[in-house]
Image (spheres, coloured by chain):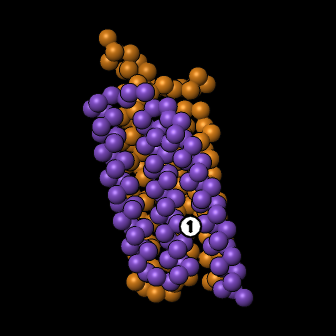
Amino acid sequence: MTASFLDASVSLALTLLAVAIAAAFGRLLRGPSIADRVIALDVIAATIVASAVLYALRTGLAVFVDVALAIALVSFVGTVALAHAIESGGDRE
Amino acid sequence: MTGILASVLVVLGASLVLVASVGVLRLPDLYTRMHASTKPATLGVGLIVAALAIYSGELGIAVRALLILLFFLLTAPVAAHRLGHAAYWAGVARWSGTVRDDLSREREANRR
């Protein structure tokens, strides 16, 4: 009974995360500045990390934990690099 | 027991991530959006990762899960600070309802 309860909550959580990605994607489309889009990408990356961890929880495959860690790493480096680009190049609308 | 605890943590964490992205979509300017994106998203991912660490029962998975949490706690403030600093000095507009800007004088001096 407990396992199916967990399965149902993981499904609910994945649905919530899908809505979260859609909302962040709205901000990615709307902008208006580059920094807003970077923030939206950051939130999308965090959501994908959460989804990968949930998938590891559901399937029991430990590989997805490494996937989550790698995505978190790439997202951090990407955010810092884009912040540097905004700083040196100016924020064009 | 661990199953129920993990379920509660998973749903709470996903709700927090949803709150973060709705905040990013709805709040009025970059700086308030950044406020929404960093804290609830980090806590939400942290709760989901904690659920995995509790439920898996394997040391290897739990350690890697906690590593993700530690990494998020370390990098989220750094990334947000870099981005906020870059955006402020690049001149991203503030919300008209902003009541306090401690850097406004330096910004004006910088402009001249």
Chain identifier of the purple chain: A
User: Which residue matches tag 1?
Assistant: B47
Q: Which residue is at 60% across, 59% downward?
A: A18
Residue B97 at x, y percent in the picture: 61, 25
Q: Which residue is at 65% across, 79% downward?
A: A7
Residue B4 at x, y percent in the picture: 68, 80
Instruction: Determine if residue B19 is in view.
Output: yes
Instruction: Determine if residue B1 is in view.
Output: no
In which quadrant is the C terminus of chain B drawn? top left
- Amino acid carrying label 1: it is Leu
Chain identifier of the orange chain: B
Q: How many marks?
A: 1
In which quadrant is the N terminus of chain B drawn? bottom right
Q: Give the left or right position of residue A51, taking residue A2 as reference.
A: left
Q: Is residue B5 above or below residue A87?
A: below
- Secondary element under disc 1, as helix, strand or loop, is helix
Residue A19 at x, y percent in the picture: 63, 55
The extreme left residue here reads: A88
Q: Is residue B88 above or below residue A51?
A: above
